[in-house]
Image (tube, rainbow, N blue to C red):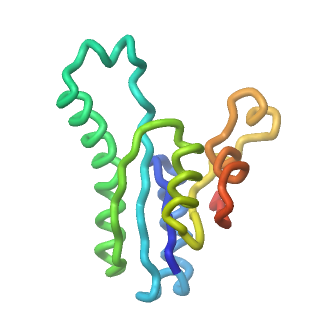
Amino acid sequence: MKILLAVDGSPYTRKMLAWLSANDDFLAGAHQYTVLTVTPVIPPHAARLFQASELKAYYDDTAEAVFKPIRKFTARHNLATQYVGKTGNAGEVIAKVADKDKFDLVIMGSHGQSSLMNLVTGSVATKVLANSKVPVLLVR
């Protein structure tokens, strides 16, 4: 199975990894994992103050900070894993990557906000569910 792990480095990512480690079927060697993190884009008026190489370094460093503990997890469990860092709106980017790269499943942690809070702020999980044709497993 081709599985996309959408991560942000939060405690909800750690809960999702704990859930994975407790479910042996997901740790079987037959799965291919891609770990995806999405960094918000720096607004154009602020980005113009930096050189392109500085912005790229910022985005790369931000993604690597999220990936570092996950690399330890995947190495410990001998999981074949690719790491992808993107920029943009997290919910939209996750859904696009899941569909475009034909993943079988997206697994992600969810903050578990109330419906009222989702109406006010929106939710990455809600956007992924609304925009992706791929099944999504939310771990709370």
The answer to whether residue 25 is above or below residue 14 is below
Report the side of 117 relative to 5 (left or right).
right
> For the point 47% across and 53% down, which residue is it?
7
The quadrant the C terminus occupies is bottom right
Identify the image quadrant of residue 106.
bottom right
> For the point 55% across and 86% down, which residue is it?
25
The answer to whether residue 36 is above or below residue 40 is below
Q: Position of residue 8 (x, y in %)?
A: 46, 47
Q: Nearer the viewer, residue 1 or 9?
A: 1
Identify the image quadrant of residue 51.
top left
The answer to whether residue 105 is above or below residue 46 is below
Q: How many marks?
A: 0
Q: Position of residue 53 (x, y in %)?
A: 18, 31
Q: Position of residue 4 (x, y in %)?
A: 50, 65
Q: Nearer the viewer, residue 8 or 45?
A: 45
Q: Position of residue 10 (x, y in %)?
A: 48, 47
The answer to whether residue 23 is above or below residue 5 is below
Report the side of 31 relative to 130 (left or right).
left
Report the side of 138 relative to 5 (left or right).
right
> For the point 33% across and 58% down, which residue is it?
69
